[in-house]
Image (cartoon, helix red, strand yellow):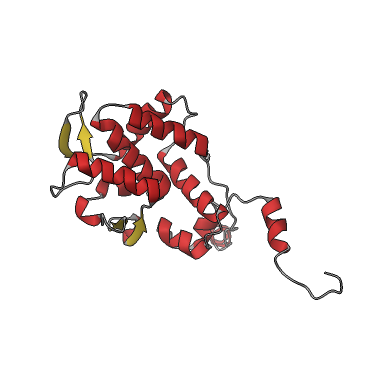
Amino acid sequence: MDAETFHRAVDIKPIKGNSIPKGRSVGSGEINALVEGCFADPSSAGIRDAAILALLYAAGLRRSEVVTLDLKYYDTESGGLRIVASKGNKARTVYLGNGAKAAMTGWIDVRGHAAGPLLYRVRKGGKIVEERLTDQAIWVILEKRFKAAKVKPFTPHDLRRTFAGEMLDAGVDLVTVQKLMGHASPVTTLRYDRRDEKTKMEAATKKHFPMAGY
C-alpha cells in the first residue's frame, strides 16, 4: 500500500455502534439460594461471603472496588460506602440498604472494628486472617458459592450487570444508576438496560395526546 492510499484509509472515521454486554443476569431465586447457602455455612466465611454478595449485587460494585474497600469507608449508620479507588479515579458514594446492610453489619460484628481492609481472608476452619482479599479471590469465592447452591455459573460482573438492570426495571432514572455504577457516560449504563418492548409500549401509554375519547 502506498503512502497516499494509507492516509486515505486512516482518515475514514470508524462506525460507532452499541454492543450488547456479554454475560447474564442472575435471577432473584438464584440470589436467594446463594445467600441461604452462605448463612448455612457455620464458619465466618459464610457471613463474609454474604457481605461480598451484597456489595456486588446490591451495590453494583466492581470486584476491584470490593477488594480495595477499607472499614473507614463504610458508614454503619447510613449504609454509605465511599468508593475512592474506582475505575478512572472517579470517587463516588453508594449505599447498602435493608438486607444488604444487615449482611454487612453481620460481617463487621464478626470481623471487628479495627482499622484495615473491610474484607479479610478466612482460612479453613473459619479463622480470620487480617489480610486483604484479591480480585482473583472474589472469583474463587463466588465459584464456590454457585457450585454449592447449584446455581448456573456467573461472573462477578454478572452481579453488577444484574444490579443495573434491576435498578432500571424498578424505574430508577438513568443518571442515578450511572452515578451508582461510576460510569463516565450514561451511554455505558444504557448498555445494561434489559427492558423489553412491552415495557416500551407501557411507557407510551403514559404520554397523553389530546384526541377526543382518549
Q: Is residue 132 visible?
A: no
Q: Is residue 63 left or right of residue 126?
A: right
Which residue is painted at 32% across and 36% down in the image? 49
- Up the image or down, 68 lies above or below 189; here it is above
Measured as percent of width and height from the top left, residue 189 is found at 50, 57
Q: Is residue 143 above or below residue 23?
A: above
Examine the rendered structure and indicate whether residue 70 appears above or below residue 88: above
Q: Quadrant of residue 208?
A: bottom right
- Estimate the x, y position of residue 87 in percent, counting from the top left: 35, 55
Q: Quadrant of the C terminus?
A: bottom right
- The answer to whether residue 45 is seen in the rendering is yes
Q: Residue at x 35, y 34 (%)?
A: 139
Whole-percent x and y of residue 75?
26, 57
Between 198 and 14, the one nearer to me in the picture: 198
Query: In this view, which residue lies farthest toward the left?
Result: 114
Residue 205, quarter of the rendered image: bottom right
Q: How many marks?
A: 0
Judge from the rendering whether residue 1 lies leftward or rightward of residue 58; answer left or right. Answer: right
Q: Nearer the viewer, residue 39 or 124?
A: 39
Q: Is residue 153 left or right of residue 133?
A: right
Q: Furthest residue to the right? A: 212
Q: Which residue is drawn at the image coordinates 44% and 46% (left, top)?
A: 160
Instruction: Find residue 168 and report its horizontal and vertical position in percent.
Output: 54, 55
> Is the residue 59 above or below the residue 123 in the image?
below
